[in-house]
Amino acid sequence: MARLAVNVDHVATIRQARGIDEPDPVLAAGIAELAGAEGIICHLREDRRHINDRDLTLLRSTVKTKLNLEMAGVDEMVEIAREVIPDLVTLVPEKREELTTEGGLDVASNQGQYEKVVRQLKEKGIEVSFFLDPDPEQIRVAHGIGADIVEVHTGHYAEARNEGEARDRFERVVKAVDFSADLQLGISAGHGLNYVNIKRFENIPRVEEYSIGHSIVSRAVLVGFEKAVREMIALVQDY
Ligand code: PXP
């Protein structure tokens, strides 16, 4: 049975849009765990555009399942990770100008750098995952430098514009999953997965965990909207 790990970044995005203190991604993480999520993910970006240092510290002390910190493999983040000690770090590429993580990490061209990062994280007992395009070469290199887990980037599949494209891109994802499994790597998948495109994974049991954020936050806004309006009406109707 596959696990769901919930990314709470976009709860923080809503908070940051107002620059106040709600909604709190830390509370959202607790609710996700109560609902059965088996992991909580947050991405601490260099520009702190959603999750901030306070969130990470509180998540570390409150998450009861597994805390997965997504981060760039740079000195500042490695230092933070070695202090906070999440259960797992997922190394991702990061560009200031992107709206969200755009592609998988190019570990093959930066092997030496990532080998060092893996060593620094493992010294502290932190598991290391690499967010990679469904590219066997990248997976092979990540395995070679000590990755525990590969998170296969599903964003290109999710963005397919027609059935043929979706089929081809999904096939690449499945091949990457099989390749990773043959190397005895842990396997997760994520980016752009939603309540529709997840269905194609029904018969891919080698994916152990799904990392999903935006579609869950989007749906929460809509499925919770009616209740929230009714609750405010109940407050104002007798005024
Ligand atoms: N996995 C990684 C490595 C990501 O960077 C993201 C986005 O933060 C996700 C999974 C979740 O993607 P989404 O928010 O589209 O579900």
Image (tube, rainbow, N blue to C red):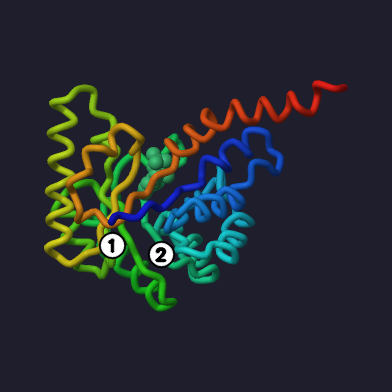
Task: Name the residue: 35% across, 35% down.
Answer: 195
Say above or below: 218 vs 236: below
The answer to which quarter of the image holds residue 231 is top right
Q: Secondary structure at mark 1?
A: strand
Q: Quadrant of the N terminus?
A: bottom left
Which residue is rendered at x = 15% and y = 46% of the image?
A: 174
- The extreme right residue here reads 239
Instruction: Estimate the x, y position of residue 186 in percent, counting from the top left.
Output: 25, 63
Position above or below: 86 against 192:
below
Q: Is mark 1 within 8 Å of ligand 1?
A: no
Q: Report whether residue 156 is seen.
A: yes
User: Are circles 1 and 2 on residues that touch, CB within 8 Å?
Assistant: yes
* Mark 2 neighbour class, 10 Å CA radius: few under 14, some 14 to 19, many 20 or more: many
* Residue 212, horizontal then vertical, whole percent: 39, 45
Q: Quadrant of residue 73?
A: bottom left
Closer to us: 28 or 8? 28
